Amino acid sequence: NPQEIGHFDTAGWTSGVYILGSNAYVADRNNGLVILDISNPASPQQVSHFDINGYTRGVYISGSNAYVADGSNGLVILDTSNPANPQEIGHFDTNGYTRGVYISGSNAYVADGSNGLVILDISNPINPQEVGHFDTNGSAVRVYVSGNYAYIADENDGLVILDISNSINPQEVGHFDTNGSALDEYISGSYAYIADGSDGLVILDISDPTNPQQMGLFDTAGFALDVYISGSYAYVADSYNGLVILDISAPSSPVKVGQFDTNGYANGVYISGSYAYVAEGPSGFVIIDISNPINPQQVGYFNTNGFAEGVYVSGNYAYVADGDNGLVIIDISDPTDPVLLSDMFWVSLWRLTGY
């Protein structure tokens, strides 16, 4: 009997949220960046709002700055040291459609849609400079950086691996063209787990980034939109097929061990402890006990008023990206009885990021 404990409706259509301390930084598409004080999750308060010129798709916080993926407006850098009064301090207009950003060291790695990967030097955030660019063959939607490599989910072009040790001249060193549409990636150890749309879950061995090899494939019955790895299991948000649980202890032979038909449209999944938190589209938010992956059981449910696209869990709270219903904050300290803390109706969310 989950209970909504918080909700806040933003004026836009939020594509992402980043939680840092007592603040939530909300990428609110045409409404720009919204900063919320969530120190009291039952009563989230707008601290400030910055209306950017583009269509805000994602946000990454590093230090006192927010790096905003702003669609056709490129990358916008805001000084958020005073959350009540964010100030734009830098901007770089990429040639594509900025959908995601990852910060590592003094560089910003921008997934720029059909323009591929753009690398910006942000050592001086006031004046970001492009130092490198690689035009992938697909549409870069996600980027993850580990060591000297950038891993790009490139939609119809699969997974692209770039050597970024020389950021001025990134080089493709590895590529694997999956048969589906690479929509999400989870890098764990020497493997990349790809939510590959109609092709299900693809497991790639990336121990040699120059030669990624498909180790395993499991063709789920739905449309794989999101994946989360925990221990020896992969949890796949499989759209109309619900949550699919795969044993990946033998990556070459993933085995389906459990499934839960959520009766909705599983868009996003986040694992914390022995629970899976699933964003269920029009059906809201579902909590599933996965302590026995063979027999997952629903223990909590909350019917949000929007279209739950993504979920991020931090401590005792779940932050649900609920489409045009904004950001919904739910107290999950008792997973069998989630309680609404706040409903931020003016924050319209599309997806929550981070793993």
Image (tube, helix red, strand yellow):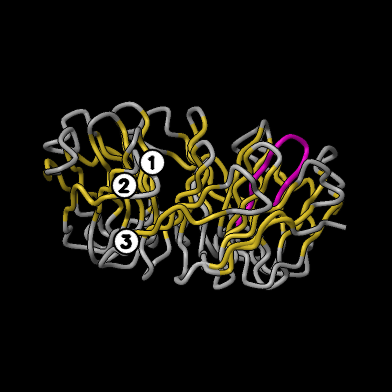
Residue 219 percent coordinates (x, y): 62, 57
Q: CA distance from mark 3 to mark 1?
A: 24 Å
Task: Say which residue appears at 31% left-offset and 32% top-offset.
Answer: 104
Kind of residue at badge 3 = Ser
Q: Is residue 180 above or below residue 324?
A: above
Main SS category, magenta section: strand
Q: Which residues are magenta?
A: 268-277
Front position in the image: 107 or 23: 23
Question: Circle 1 sits on which residue?
Answer: 61
Q: Earlier in the sequence, mark 2 or mark 3?
A: 2
| Above-or-below relation of 205 to 72 | above
Judged from the image, the secondary structure of the residue bearing numbered disc 2 is strand
Dot 1 or dot 2, earlier in sequence: 1
Q: Secondary structure at mark 3?
A: loop
Can residue 35 be seen by looking at this rendering?
Answer: yes
Contact (Cβ within 8 Å) of mark 1 with mark 2: yes
Q: Badge 1 local density, few (<14 within 10 Å), some, or many (20+)?
A: some
What separation in Å lies between label 1 and label 2 (alpha carbons)?
Answer: 6 Å
Tag 2: Cα neighbours inside 10 Å, few (<14), some, or many (≥20)? Answer: many
The residue labelled by disc 2 is 67
- What residue did someone put label 3 on? 139
Indicate the amino acid at tag 2. Tyr
Q: Nearer the viewer, residue 74 or 288?
A: 74
Residue 221 visible to the viewer = no
